[in-house]
Image: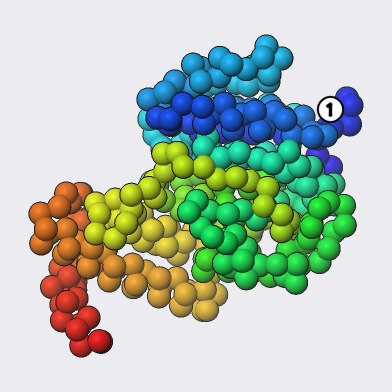
Amino acid sequence: MPQTHADGCAVFAVIIPFFQRTPGLLLTAVRSALMQRSVETTVIVVDDSSPLPAEAELLALAADERARVTVIRQDNAGPGAARNRGLAAIADDVELVAFLDSDDQWVPGHLDNARAAFAAGADVYFCDYVPLSAEVSTFRQCGLGPESGEPIGAGIDLYRYKPNLFDALLLRSPVGTSTVAFRRSIAPDLRFRTDFSYAEDVFFWMHLARRARMIAYSTQCEAIYGAGVNIAAGASWGSPQHLRRTWYDYAFHQAVIKDFPLTAEQARWNNGWMDELARTFAASFLHLLRRGGEIDWTIVRRFVAERPWLPLQAVLHPVMSRLRR
């Protein structure tokens, strides 16, 4: 059972990595965590050398609210390292952990549903959400609905997840970082990867999926996603950010091979993604090279070390594209 306070409420540690330039985002996120119903929350904000200091952003909190918030400042190391710092700072007697990004916020009942899921025996909980600039929710995009689970009945639209979540994460993740809560005892030493800065959260969820005895989800959209600083921001085709993101995505799939025993089908999926990412990287690199765009040559050298035929593929890509058309 989850750790509870004297009044019977479940206690959640909420970890918020912070690196923002827009005032007010952190305050909104923290207040949404503090205002969760029928649970007690302790918030750990990890200031990753943010241009806007976290302490200044939280001055508007009342004294009783501020007492429930811990701010840790560290040299800039990225969101994975910041979440790791938060995980290390959780009190020993707190069992339940939830993640919230500093530009997102929760609806008041989010942790109510998570609490109900844990009380029913779940080790991991997540819910639906609408990504920034999307017209439909992630669950709709991934085909995840009530029919994918068994009703638990203790929460709102709450279900036991029946499919293989690892497969879903490998193909098209239905899980958003600001929707996840988990039972710390199933993975007390698990930490986010810091050697790639895209999909490091999905990698964490994969480990949770392998260790969880039961996974629960709600079809309710309980997290509202905002438009703060984001690794994917500006990563449109032909941009330097797109080249970096493609490399990190490739590094993620490469790490999957090393960290997880894969079935033949999972290996086929993963290798297929890596091949497609290599082709995308080659095309994006050639596009930037032709237009004199900014190129991160460190990443290019890493990719060529993994795929020595990448330069040839970059040269042949326009020809092959025309032949396919």
- To which residue does mark 1 refer? 5
- Can residue 307 be seen at all in this image of the molecule? yes
**185 and 144: which is toward the camera:** 144
Q: What's the image's color scheme?
A: rainbow
Left or right: where does residue 61 sit relative to residue 9?
Answer: left
- Residue 301 picture location, percent across and down: 19, 55
Q: Is the residue 21 above or below the residue 217 in the image?
A: above
Left or right: where does residue 260 sit relative to residue 127?
Answer: left
Circle 1 SS class: loop
Toward which corner of the image does residue 70 lie, by quadrant? Answer: top right
Residue at left offset 84%, top offset 42%? 1
- Residue 255 picture location, percent across and down: 43, 58
Q: Is the residue 211 above or below the residue 170 in the image?
A: above
- Residue 191 picture location, percent across and down: 54, 42
- Residue 84 picture location, percent across and down: 52, 36
Left or right: where does residue 11 sit relative to residue 241?
Answer: right
Extreme residue toward the front, this view? 135
- Can residue 213 be seen at all in this image of the molecule? no
The disc labelled 1 sits on which kind of residue? His
Q: Is the residue 207 above or below the residue 311 in the image?
A: above
